[in-house]
Amino acid sequence: VLSVLQQEGLRLSVQQVIVQRCCEVLPVWSSCPGDERDSIRGKKADGAFSVDNLSLLLQTHAQGYQTALGIIEPLSDVSSESEASADDPSSSPIQLSTSPPSHSSTSSSSSTSSSSNSFLLTASALSFLSGRKEAFLDCEQISQEADGLLREFPILSAYLHTMVEPVLGTTLGEGEESSVGLGGAICGKPLASLVLSGPQEEVTQALAAEAFKNALESKDLARALRLLELYGQKGSQERELRDQLLVCAALEDETEGVGQLFRVQDANLRARVALQALERWPLSACLELIDFCLHDPDTQNSLKTELVLKQKELGIYRWTMNLQPSLPWKTWQELRTESKTNPESMLSMILEAKEFSLCKQWVELYPVSDQLKLQLQTEHLLHLLEMEQTDEAFQLLESISDVAVGLDVCEHALDRRPGLAACHFLADYLTLHFQRQVSPARRRHIHALHLGSKVLLTIPPASRQDYFPLLSEPMLMLEQLLMNLKVEWAEVAVQTLQSLLVGQETGFSAEDIDKLLADYACKALDFSCAPKERSRSDSVISLQDALIQCPAQELSSQSFSQIESPASSTNSTPTHTLSGNSSERKKDRGSAERSQRLSAKFQPPDQPPAQKDWVPDTQHDMCMVCRRERFTMFNRRHHCRRCGRLVCSACSERKMLVDGCPGEEVRVCDDCYVYFHPDSDDESESAEIIGSPVVSQDALDGMLHLPEVVHQQFRLSTNPAENQLLRNEFYYEQAPSAHLCVTILSLHSDQAVCGHQLIDHCRSLSRKLTNPEVDACLLTGIMRQLLFSAKLMFVKVGQSQDLPLCDR
């Protein structure tokens, strides 16, 4: 057309010619006076696309969501309206087919248009421009011409697209690449005149209502929403209907439908739906929706209360799902189901992760047993004490309203023996807050723990671990200190106990402490010897025994060594180095002696003898294994626990398990050990030969070899039988030692009593002076030291009347 106009030189606008000469003016909307507008609005309220009719349609197709929507009206009106629609031919649905009409329908449309003086877009309309022969255009040509014209009117094209697409239920393409354009969809069909006549016309409303019904039937709620927004009447009831449609759309889509609820304008409806349908959506979306509802000022307070509880529950699920190591459940819905089914096992998992704050909140949601709650509080308390958060631990105990529960938590935590600081805290708290609620026995135990923690704090940190098992037995802690010669530590421990015993029920008193000190002061002077009188000189006895027991060559070598290195003076104090002498004696024994012992192999008894059946101390003066070592006040007698014989220290250094001796391995003689361990003797001999370094005599000249003294660490336990067995075997290697005895007694609370005890010890030692195994000069010197210390004690306490007792 444009090329023809250019050839003819005509300056005409094709669009203006078509609008002015070929088209009929169609109003997009009608403007009426006020009264007429109100009458029309009242008429439309009862029309096909009225809110009431749409609500009935929604109730029919959303019966599964009536609870969430709050719909309680009966649906009888819907069925009656449907029957009325079937009887009324005027209410027959308008066909929305987009297929091209047949030739007969086209002819009827042409005749109808001619009778109403409507202009039909044909080639004759433009014949005056080109002089071409008039010809009718078919539907395809009309559609193409319409699409071409609509490109020149983009606003009209966009309007028609917006209004037509939700009615048709399809998306119309734009541009040359689309197969069916807007012109092909509406040209030659009733839809064109209905759309162009205005969205509020009655016929258009009926057409939109039919499309709305089809959208509900196909569950295309997005299409229904668009129809409502385009063809609705924009009233308050319509907003309610829109909110209901949004709710239905949200409930239909279980993945992203929660986003539709944010568009709901009714805050209470949104909150109710959120509370009822949260399990449909992911956790993060649910929390976001609840937060949105809580910040809406129009939400009712009752609904806000429920939303806060639900938010707290979902927060617990989110916290639980973020635990490390992660739990096997992937969604919060699965976690909630497991929590309802197995609440105690779920709480145990959270407890293992040490998330005690989470456990406390979780217990408020799901009921668990009182025992598990007690375990939770106990573990939380111990965790706080382990982290040295004593203020938080105190607040936790104070937050427990039930006194009985608080007492149980403290006692269970204390029975776990968590650590020194924790035990000290718990003992203090129980002493201050539950003094009257506990039984007398339990009260004594708590006080003992309190004292034990105080004593343990006086011990250097590096050694506390050795005494921590005796925390509830302060007396055993003090006794172990004395056994291990920790007299300085024992002095501080005694002072601590004596200062804290006032008014405490601990099961022991200051007199018990003094008795323990007196017992170990006595052990400092105790040494074993056979109770027999001296009848001949020690030199004669030694010479005769040496001639009988020792070979001639060995005796000569011993005599030669005595000549070369004479014995020390009788006034000197011998140094007791048991471990060093035993190692030296072992090296002096040759392989010839081992072969003799192996040739006459010892046969131990079938069963270990009882202690009463052991060989008495007075029966032998020499070791029954090596037949060389004579028992003296420093070379002590030992009993083999397997055969019961008297043996020296060098022949009883090994240990093994023996029936009838519970606990650890016990001392046995070499013969019994080799008998039950046949390969040990050969291995030790070969190892001794191989491991011996080859050193020249020149290198040994001028070297001083000091024996290595290994101090045994004694450890008591809470088992009385084991402790008694250890006490029976205990002795001080330094004994007899006047200095050790006086040092221990100096810790006594009554120095006058200590002075008398020292005098009694001197009387006991004097009875052993005639024993041939005793060094009389050494023992006399020890007695003099004890008597001098007794004088000092009497003078210190002002009892000068007892000084003559020390001069007898």
Image (spheres, rainbow, N blue to C red):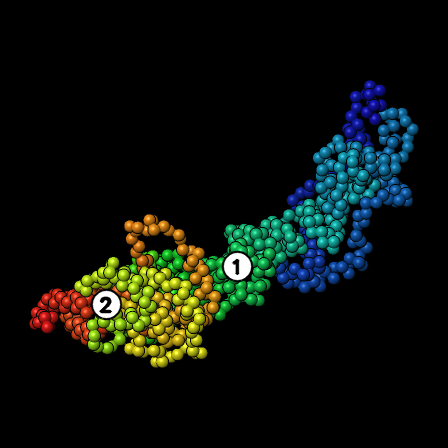
Determine whether, in the image, residue 400 is placed left or right of residue 296: left
Determine whether, in the image, residue 242 is placed left or right of residue 644: right
Give the labeled residue for mark 2. Answer: 736
Report the front residue among 794 and 694. Answer: 694
Of the residues shown, which amino acid type is indicated by label 1? Answer: Glu
Question: Above or below — where is 695 with respect to 6?
Answer: below
Determine whether, in the image, residue 631 is placed left or right of residue 354: left
Q: Nearer the viewer, mark 2 or mark 1?
A: 2
Q: Quadrant of residue 600?
A: bottom left
Q: Position of residue 238 (x, y in %)?
A: 64, 51
Q: Residue at x 62, y 59 (%)?
A: 68
Determine whether, in the image, residue 226 is placed left or right of residue 477: right
Question: Above or below — where is 41 with respect to 403?
Answer: above
Q: Position of residue 497 (x, y in %)?
A: 25, 66
Q: Quadrant of residue 591?
A: bottom left
Distance Cα–Cα, label 2 vs label 1: 75 Å
Report the front residue among 632 and 8. Answer: 632
Give the labeled residue for mark 1. Answer: 313
Residue that extends furthest to the right in the rendered view of this protein: 133
